[in-house]
Amino acid sequence: FLILTSLLSLSIVIHDLALLEEDLRPSILSIPNMKYATPCLWEWLSCLQCRRRMRVLQRRNKCLWTTLVPVWTVGHLLIFMVVMYPIALLVYMIAPVRMSRIMVFL
């Protein structure tokens, strides 16, 4: 817990310092900007989350979809904690200014 709190504090400091410098403001990524900056990653995440399949299932079989939503939600939480947060942390270590907003709100 102490490590995560320290990383969050560091992210907030880097983000705020980057916002103070006008030249760095455009380089800070937000969630919508990340979609355009890394389209392959965004497509991989959509595939990993099975969004399209769940939409199709919702239209075709509401009863099965209703029973799968809790399992799907728990799966998303696990994927976020096991896959996404470590990847974001790794990218943050490589590009702290660009990823500062993502890490603050992640």
Image (cartoon, rainbow, N blue to C red):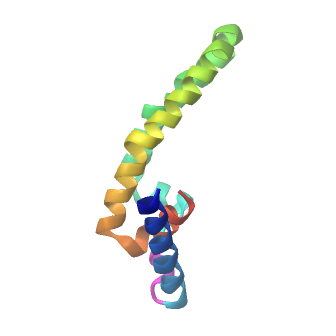
Quarter occupied by residue 54: top right
Is residue 14 visible in this depiction of the protein? Answer: yes
Indicate the position of residue 8 as horizontal and vertical percent values: 49, 66
Vertical placement of 66 versus 47: above or below? above
**Looking at this view, is 98 or 39 the one in front?**
98
Q: Residue at x 58, y 29 (%)?
A: 73
Q: Residue at x 70, y 12 (%)?
A: 62
Is residue 28 visible in this depiction of the protein? Answer: no
Indicate the position of residue 52 as horizontal and vertical percent values: 54, 27
Vertical placement of 14 versus 61: above or below? below
Vertical placement of 82 versus 59: above or below? below
Indicate the position of residue 99 as horizontal and vertical percent values: 43, 67
Is 104 in the magenta?
Answer: no
Looking at the image, how many numbered discs can be counted on the residues? 0
Q: Residue furthest front?
A: 2
**Magenta stretch bounds:** 23-27
Indicate the position of residue 15 as horizontal and vertical percent values: 50, 77
Compared across the picture, whether 90 is left or right of 30 comes to left
- Which secondary structure dominates the residues rendered in magenta? helix
Q: Residue at x 45, y 61 (%)?
A: 2
**Looking at this view, is 78 or 29 the one in front?**
78
**Looking at this view, is 15 or 61 the one in front?**
15
Vertical placement of 64 versus 41: above or below? above
Compared across the picture, whether 39 is left or right of 68 comes to left
Quarter occupied by residue 10: bottom left
Compared across the picture, whether 55 is left or right of 95 comes to right
